[in-house]
Amino acid sequence: MKVGEKYYKSIWKDEGDHGSVHVIDQRRLPFSFEVMTLGSVADVYDAIRDMAVRGAPLIGAVAAWGVYLSFLEHVGRTVSSSDDQSASRDLLSPVRRDAERLKSARPTAVNLAWAVDYMTAVMKSYPDAGVLRKAAQGLCDEEEERSRMIGVHGLPLIEDISSKKHGDAVNILTHCNAGWLACVDYGTALAPVYLAHDNGIRVHVWVDETRPRNQGSRLTAWELVNHGVPCTLITDNAGGHLMQNGMVDIVLVGCDRATASGDVANKTGTYLKALAANDNGVPFWSALPASTFDLSVDRPGQIEIEERDADEVRTIDGVSIAPEGIAVSNYGFDVTPARLITGLITDRGICRAEKESILKMLS
Ligand code: MRU
């Protein structure tokens, strides 16, 4: 996507430099646009844990490079067939340890474990830096294409509402940031919005601020304003009122992990939006790439929900907003049950949030 006059993706590598990747430090937006260089697996772990990079598809993409960088650090050469089996196991074991550590950086978004497991499987078959570099780049390219296709498959939903409204602006409510910053490019929930806007369909986005880290006000609002998409920032609790008063045509959110039954883990507060949408007959869609399905789970309770630092709630940018030492609960995600979800928009097409429909689409 364009930032000023320049096109950016959320992660990229310089042509001749095989020892690092670049990302945008999302903690600094919208106040300053700073590029971070990640040159080691420790840099990658810190960037994911401290949320310099965030969003399910992006943390998977960054972690893939983390496995590659760990291989460079610990092995740095091709493990050849002349290395006996136990020597090659010893050579690769620090990379495996780093891989497990990377997976622990953030527990809810399944893309992280999925990407790390993919890279360690490649390493097992081809313990070679060049192969791993290509695998990490390939994973990023595929993730970008998946986001583009989510846009293509989600566009008709917006077109349909637009034509029912005779071209009046389609009012879309979104939570957190499921735009290009959260992916390699385009976004998930925002991919159809950008495409609709670029195709001349009138859209307007209600942006939930998304306390406590404010991914809505800091990132989604920045993205949309940059792209010229009309949008309005709202407090997290305003959506119900807007829906009651016919001011929301569709809710579009992202997803950090979807169960085989179509339940969707996403940023805390998503579930409350789904309840309000259900009560007011507003369609509620979640957009996700195939890499965000976790078919090994089929009940909401099986998803580990990340609990984050109390100071995210007690303070804003270091300024205290609560009595010192107050007890805090800070769950980063919640799970919206499939029964509240109108459907899922994926890179393979759209489907109902239920097992049969999901498995058919993914097969
Ligand atoms: O804690 P974050 O900022 O990583 O949470 C991100 C979200 O909840 C997004 O909605 C989700 O990752 C889908 S992103 C395309």
Image (tube, grey):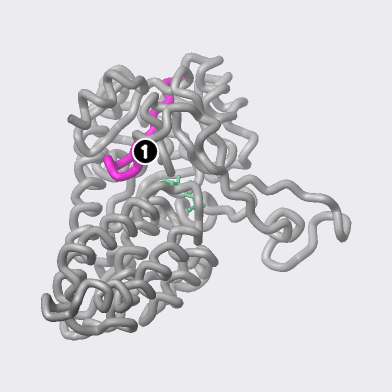
Judged from this view, the residue extending furthest toward the left is 81
Q: Considering the image in quadrants, where does the C terminus appear?
A: top left
Q: Which residue is at a point 36% across and 47% down the rendered structure image? A: 229
> Where 230 sits versus 349, above or below?
below
Task: Reply above or below: 337 against 125.
Answer: above
Callout 1: helix, strand or loop? strand
Q: Which residue is located at x 31 percent, y 22 percent?
A: 161
What residue do we see at 26% from left, 38% from top?
196
Residue 140, horizontal then vertical, whole percent: 24, 60
Residue denoted by label 1: 294
- Residue type at mark 1 is Asp
| Coordinates of residue 111 in the picture (x, y in percent) | 36, 50
Q: Quadrant of the N terminus?
A: bottom left
* Towards the viewer: 150 or 264: 264
Q: Is residue 292 magenta?
A: yes
Task: Say which quarter of the image contains residue 65.
Answer: bottom left
Task: State which region is magenta.
Answer: 282-294
Residue 157 horizontal/vertical position (percent) = 28, 26
Residue 143 x/y as whole percent: 24, 52
309 sits left or right of 296 in the view: right
